[in-house]
Image (tube, grey):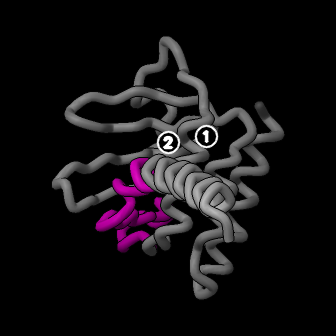
């Protein structure tokens, strides 16, 4: 191989490898918070006995955060106004714990995601109940009857809105 071709090839590889490195850094920066993070989901459905819960996988946790990031703020919303305190389905509680000793809590119910973080909270609007419906899909198989009931409750609320 001639020196000019060899230099072109080498320089081309350097540029390609540099671009790959930059892409890797971007991906790493966005996924780095997921390492060491655990997301616990609780289906708030029982009264007087423990509610069922499960953990999201790393992929599911990433998908959950993507879904949350696409929601719009719900203006003039008091955090307690979307909560239902009666019997039956009352939504989901998703608690994030990560190795940085930070935690967030997501209260998901009735088309609203209330995010509690650093002693403050804000509400996001989930008009199509997509986050609630998606969380139902992540439930373990042994909760099929509860998932069916919760799905009916969500569909009923969607029909009324």
* Residue that protrudes farthest toward the bottom in the picture: 142
Which residues make up the magenta segment?
28-53
Gap between marks 1 and 2, in whole Å? 9 Å
Residue identifier under label 2: 84
Query: Is there a contact, CB below 8 Å, between mark 1 and mark 2?
Result: yes
Q: Quadrant of the N terminus?
A: bottom right
Q: Tell us which disc is closer to us: 1 or 2.
A: 1
Describe the element under mark 2 as helix, strand or loop: loop
- Give left or right: position of 146 versus 62: right
Measuring from the top left, give residue 16's x and y in whole percent: 60, 54
- Give left or right: position of 114 versus 64: left
Between discs 1 and 2, the one toward the N terminus: 2
Height in image: 17 above or below 121? below
Give yes or no for residue 44 being in the magenta stretch.
Answer: yes
Q: Is residue 93 visible?
A: no
Q: Quadrant of the C terminus?
A: top right
Give yes or no for residue 140 being in the magenta stretch.
Answer: no
């Amino acid at each position: 191989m001639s020196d000019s071709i060899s230099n072109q090839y080498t320089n081309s590889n350097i540029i390609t490898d540099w671009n790959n490195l930059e892409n890797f850094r971007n991906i790493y920066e966005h996924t780095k918070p997921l390492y060491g993070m655990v997301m616990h989901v609780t289906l708030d459905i029982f009264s007087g006995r423990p509610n069922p819960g499960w953990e999201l996988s790393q992929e599911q946790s990433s998908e959950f955060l993507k879904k949350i990031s696409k929601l719009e703020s719900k203006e003039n919303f008091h955090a307690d106004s979307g909560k239902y305190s009666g019997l039956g389905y009352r939504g989901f509680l998703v608690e994030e714990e990560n190795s940085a000793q930070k935690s967030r809590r997501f209260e998901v119910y009735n088309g609203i995601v209330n995010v509690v973080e650093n002693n403050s909270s804000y509400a996001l609007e989930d008009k199509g109940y997509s986050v609630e419906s998606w969380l139902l899909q992540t439930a373990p198989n042994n909760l099929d009857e509860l998932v069916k009931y919760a799905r009916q409750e969500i569909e009923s609320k969607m029909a009324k809105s």
